[in-house]
Image (cartoon, rainbow, N blue to C red):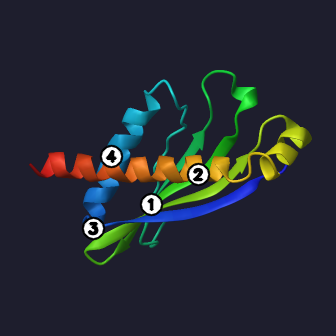
Amino acid sequence: MSEVPIEMYVPLTILPNHARDAAQRVLEQIAANTYHALKLTAQCGGGDPRWEFPITLRARTAERFFPTFEGSLIVTPLGESCELWLQGAYTPPLGKLGSQVDATVLRGVAQANLRSFLQSFADDVRSATASSEA
C-alpha cells in the first residue's frame, strides 16, 4: 500500500494560545462524533514554537473501503495570529487496486475531503474561540 503525503494550511486571525486551547476542545468534540475515529494526544515540543496534535482519521464503519489518514494538526504562531496545518499521509483502501483507483478515477477526492476537514476544523476553532471570549 502506498501512502499519499498531505500538507495544507489555513490562516487564523486568532491569538496562538487561544487557537491551541480551542483546537484541543474541538478535537475532543470530534472524537465523540460518530463520523470520525481519532486518536488524540497533544504535545508541545521542547522549545518548538508550535503545538502539535497527532491524529488518525478513519471511517467508523466499512473501514476497509475508505482511506486512513495518519498525521497531525499543528497550530503555528505568527505573532498575533497563527496558521493551522494538516500534515501527514493517507493510505488508500483495498491495497494495490485501491492505490490505482485513487491515482486515476478518484484522483484528488481524498485530498479535497481532507481540505474540507481542515477548513471545517478551522471554522470550529474560530467559533470555539469566539464563544470562550464572549
The quarter holding residue 26 reads top left
**Label 4 Cα crowd, 10 Å radius (few <14 / some 14-19 / many 20+):** some
Q: Earlier in the sequence, mark 3 or mark 1?
A: 3
Disc ID at residue 88: none
Residue 49: x %, y % from top left: 41, 72
**Residue holding disc 2:** 112
Q: Earlier in the sequence, mark 1 or mark 4?
A: 1
Residue 120: x %, y % from top left: 41, 47
Q: Amino acid at mark 3?
A: Thr
**Label 3 Cα crowd, 10 Å radius (few <14 / some 14-19 / many 20+):** few
| Nearer-the-camera pick, 79 or 41 | 79
**Residue holding disc 4:** 124
Please name which of the two marks, 1 or 2, marks the residue nearer to the observer: 2
Residue drawn at point x = 83 percent, y = 40 percent? 98
Residue drawn at point x = 25 percent, y = 46 percent? 128
Please name which of the two marks, 1 or 4, marks the residue nearer to the observer: 4
Q: Amino acid at mark 2?
A: Ala
